[in-house]
Amino acid sequence: MGAVVSNPAVSQRELWNRQHCERAVNVEDCDLPTQFGKRVASLLCPPDRLLEFGCAAGRDTLHFATVARSVLGCDFSESALTILMSSATRKGLADRVQVKCYDLNEQFRNDTGEPFSVVYTRCSLHVDDETARRLIADISVNLVPGGLLCAEVKSVTDPLFGLGDEVFRNGFVLPDTQGRGHLRRFWSVEELSMLMKDHFRIVASGTTTEFHLGKETHLVHVIAVLRPFAAAPTGHSASENVL
């Protein structure tokens, strides 16, 4: 395990902007939602509004937009958001998709003036404990009654866990061939559930193993309902499909 250092010696925004530009030639990959994204999409219906943190180039965002009334995709990579909106336009979904350049280390501000039915995040909670707790509190005040928080994150059993320099607890900067690496935070199901327990009631959790670009990755996920549970005032609540 690498030595603990105070800050990542890399600009993660710059790294991801570069990587998304390099991946833009494979923009058709956005047509393929993740397994967890497909599961969450099955809980949605047309009245729902979904907020996604760490949407990247939109492989799940675009899938959600085929079901939900609207989707707000947030990411700190301007390049990713540009690719996402280009794909949404190409697919005829631009009227259902909005984007917001947002860093998880900042306080989230909902500029839409309307709460969300579902908040979704996958492989983006690469933050320390204090930031994660603040983010969960921000999410809780931007959901409708009975709203869902659906999160999938890197597992502490992942082969990459412990590699590189530790910048905060279970958070590591992984070296790459160019001397600049990704920041990765690893979680257990229990830790992720404890993070949410003050604001949410856990209704589903589990672990999965997937292969991405030929590499094995271990993930944990949690689906949780906002406390105190109450159905949305009118119409359908996504949580009805879980409970």
Image (cartoon, grey):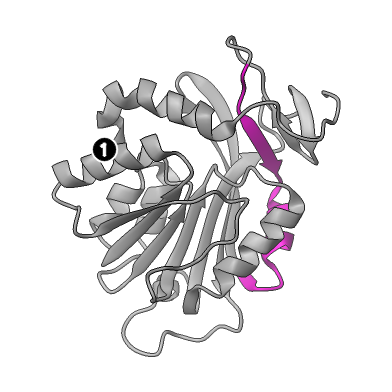
Reply yes or no: does residue 197 show up in magenta: yes
Seen in the image, is 71 located left or right of residue 208? left
Vertical position of residue 28 compared to residue 130: above or below: above
Q: Quadrant of the N terminus?
A: top right
Reply yes or no: does residue 183 show up in magenta: yes
For the point 53% across and 35% down, the residue is 13
**Mark 1 Cα-neighbour bin, 10 Å: few <14, some 14–19, many ≥20:** some
Vertical position of residue 154 compared to residue 18: above or below: below
Vertical position of residue 176 compared to residue 110: above or below: above
Q: Quadrant of residue 20?
A: top left
Residue 133 image position (x, y, % from top left): 70, 61
- Residue on which the image places disc 1: 31
For the point 17% across and 46% down, the residue is 89
Residue found farthest to the bottom: 233
Seen in the image, is 95 located left or right of residue 27? left
Start-end of magenta stretch: 180-202
Q: Nearer the viewer, residue 83 or 216?
A: 83
Residue found farthest to the right: 3
Residue 237 seen by the camera: yes
Seen in the image, is 40 located left or right of residue 215? left
The residue type indicated by label 1 comes to Asp
Residue 201 image position (x, y, % from top left): 63, 72
Residue 32 seen by the camera: no
Count of marks placed on residues: 1
Residue 104 image position (x, y, % from top left): 58, 51
